[in-house]
């Protein structure tokens, strides 16, 4: 089906972003963008490693996300270096794994078998800052085989922070 990524390696990239846009993504793996067909399969079998994401946003609201992953399965995120600075009331995220399976239709499941390891995340925010986040309503039901290990996370926030968090 269209609309999903599979069998892709995103490695050894340097991404520098200076932006005033409301929504900013260094590496974005989402299956519901242009071309999405309801019932498409999950994004799967990705390796996202050895990338550097430097992001600075001056947006009044919104967010800066270095690595955003949605409904990802059977994948590894490792050895990435992330720096995100947001000003004003824009939140920031280092690595976010989300679950949109509730509204994506049949054929899409909650994330599973994802390893996030050996990443360095530094966040600086005037708003909420989230180092590594697993965001889901269903993904944490039962055994989904998530591994979050050996990461170095530093968060500086004026309004609230999570180093590593799982929440719905």
Image (spheres, rainbow, N blue to C red):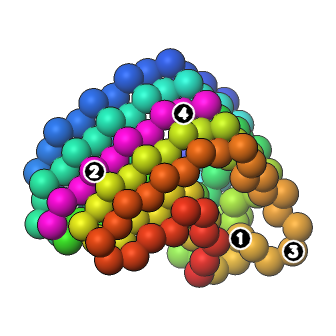
Image coordinates of residue 84 in percent, x first then y, are 34, 47
Return the disc, 1 or 4, that comes first in the chain's sequence.
4
Question: Circle 4 sits on which residue?
Answer: 80
Along the horizontal axis of the image, is 15 left or right of 130?
left
Return the disc, 2 or 1, that comes first in the chain's sequence.
2
Residue occupying the point 56% across, 57% down: 132
In the depicted structure, whether residue 56 falls above or below residue 141: above
Q: In front: 34, or 86?
A: 86
Residue occupying the point 55% across, 62% down: 163
| CA distance separating discs 1 and 4 | 24 Å
| Callout 1–callout 4 Cβ contact below 8 Å | no
The chief SS type of the magenta part is strand
Question: Circle 2 sits on which residue?
Answer: 85
In the depicted structure, whether residue 36 falls above or below residue 54: below
| CA distance separating discs 3 and 2 | 35 Å
Image coordinates of residue 146 in percent, x first then y, are 78, 57
Query: What secondary structure is found at the residue carrying circle 3?
Result: loop
Callout 3 environment at 10 Å: few (<14), some (14 to 19), or many (20+)? Answer: few
Query: What secondary structure is found at the residue carrying circle 2?
Result: strand
Q: Which residues are magenta?
A: 79-88
Which of pointers 1 and 4 indicates the residue nearer the eye? 4
Label tally: 4
Q: In front: 20, or 44?
A: 20
Callout 4 environment at 10 Å: few (<14), some (14 to 19), or many (20+)? Answer: many
Along the horizontal axis of the image, is 61 left or right of 67?
left
Q: Is residue 80 magenta?
A: yes
Question: Circle 3 sits on which residue?
Answer: 142
In the depicted structure, whether residue 121 falls above or below residue 59: above
| CA distance separating discs 2 and 4 | 16 Å
């Amino acid at each position: 089906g269209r609309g999903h990524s599979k069998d892709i390696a995103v490695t050894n990239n340097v991404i520098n972003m200076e932006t005033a846009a409301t929504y900013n993504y260094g590496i974005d793996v989402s299956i519901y963008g242009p071309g999405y067909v309801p019932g498409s399969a999950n994004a799967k079998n990705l390796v996202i490693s050895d990338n550097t994401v430097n992001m600075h946003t001056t947006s009044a609201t919104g967010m800066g996300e270095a690595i955003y992953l949605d409904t990802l399965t059977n994948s590894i995120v490792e050895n990435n270096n992330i720096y995100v600075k947001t000003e004003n009331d824009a939140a920031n995220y280092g690595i976010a794994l989300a679950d949109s399976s509730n509204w994506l239709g049949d054929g899409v499941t909650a994330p599973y078998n994802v390893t996030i390891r050996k990443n360095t995340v530094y966040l600086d925010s005037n708003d909420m800052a989230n180092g590594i986040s697993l965001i889901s309503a269903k993904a944490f039901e039962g055994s989904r085989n998530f591994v979050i290990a050996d990461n170095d996370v530093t968060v500086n926030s004026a309004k609230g922070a999570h180093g590593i968090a799982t929440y719905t």
